[in-house]
Image (spheres, helix red, strand yellow):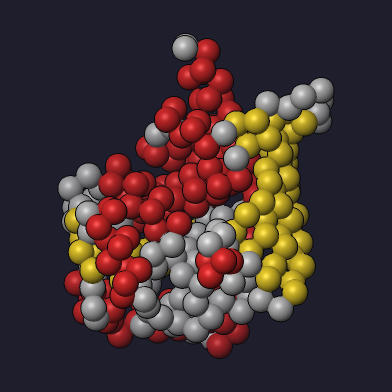
Amino acid sequence: MTLPFVPGEAETYLDWLALTQVLAAGHRLPEAVVADTVISRGTDRLLNRSAWIDGLGGLVKAATIFPGNPARGVPSVNGTVTLYSDATGEAEAMLDFHLVTKWKTAGDSLLAARRLARPDSRRILIVGAGAVATSLVEAYRQGFPAAEFTLWNRTRDKAEAFAQQIDAKVADDLKLAVSTADIICTATMAKTPIIHGEWLRRGQHLDLIGAFAPDMREADDTAMRMGRVFVDCFGTTLSHIGELIAPLASGALTRSDVLADFRDLDAFCRAPDDITVFKNGGGAHLDLMTSRYILESWRAGTAKR
């Protein structure tokens, strides 16, 4: 059997707001069974993620993360995605890895932001200038169409080049940029916090994306303690990612301080003056929901040609 391959061009059939609705609906299905493994070689990692949702099917996503690749002109994250039939277990399709990752990651954050950020948010700060930052701008522009974007990156030249592509301003002072933003999105490879709670003010939404391993985090204990904390999935964040491991270990947070995950979307709410914090963990169950959406949208779109 030859599997269909869903290419990157399939995104011409996709919509960010529709994806958030798909993700919300996916969390009303039976809870996903997920399994993750990580193999490391120095700073290089091989992640194997799988998920099965009764009624939706199965997925295996293998990802390699090589931080030194950009110096070689190669993306730092690569991999493969295979989708399996829920009815028979047969491999149903292979999907472009970067397409799935792009839409899953930014869609995850947008779903949370549409519930946790103030609807009148106008100033969005993107911290980082990699591939994830591009998809965040696309997603947040659709979710918050009146917003203006500011970009901060450790490397100023990279920030300026990226800002020209996305029609954004460049911030010189991260502290000032954080303190004046309505929504702060972090998409870095930071090992130590770059966002400090003393910079935050009431009413903000902090969207933490970059950290994916136990030794990584982007926000300090004070920031986590100041906010109402939510995650996309308890099972793939609390004991897997430094963003939660560290403040839980230090006592800055207790388990009860992490208020809800996407299985309880009705709990994703805020008062106007709240600081909300969302940890985007991006588990394989979200890849599965996103891949199913991409495949069905691609099939529908190509059928109309």
Q: Position of residue 64 (x, y in %)?
A: 67, 60
Q: Is residue 290 visible?
A: yes
Asked whether 205 or 73 is in front, the reply is: 73
Write the residue at 33% across / 52% down: 137
Above or below, 2 relative to 268: above
Write the residue at 57% across / 34% down: 7
Write the residue at 54% across / 86% down: 251
Asked whether 55 or 190 is in front, the reply is: 190
Q: Is residue 121 visible?
A: no
Above or below, 162 relative to 262: below
Q: Position of residue 141 (x, y in %)?
A: 28, 47
- Give the left or right position of residue 54, taking residue 277 as reference: right
Q: Quadrant of residue 59?
A: top right
- Give the left or right position of residue 107, taking residue 67 as reference: left
Specify the quadrant that holds the N terminus: top right
Q: Position of residue 45 (x, y in %)?
A: 69, 67
Residue furthest bottom in the image:
250
Q: Quadrant of residue 126?
A: bottom left
- Give the left or right position of residue 82, taking residue 25 as reference: right
Looking at the image, how many numbered discs can be counted on the residues? 0
Residue furthest top in the image:
304
Above or below, 289 relative to 153: above
Asked whether 194 or 153 is in front, the reply is: 153
Write the residue at 53% across / 55% down: 232
Q: Position of residue 161 (x, y in %)?
A: 30, 63
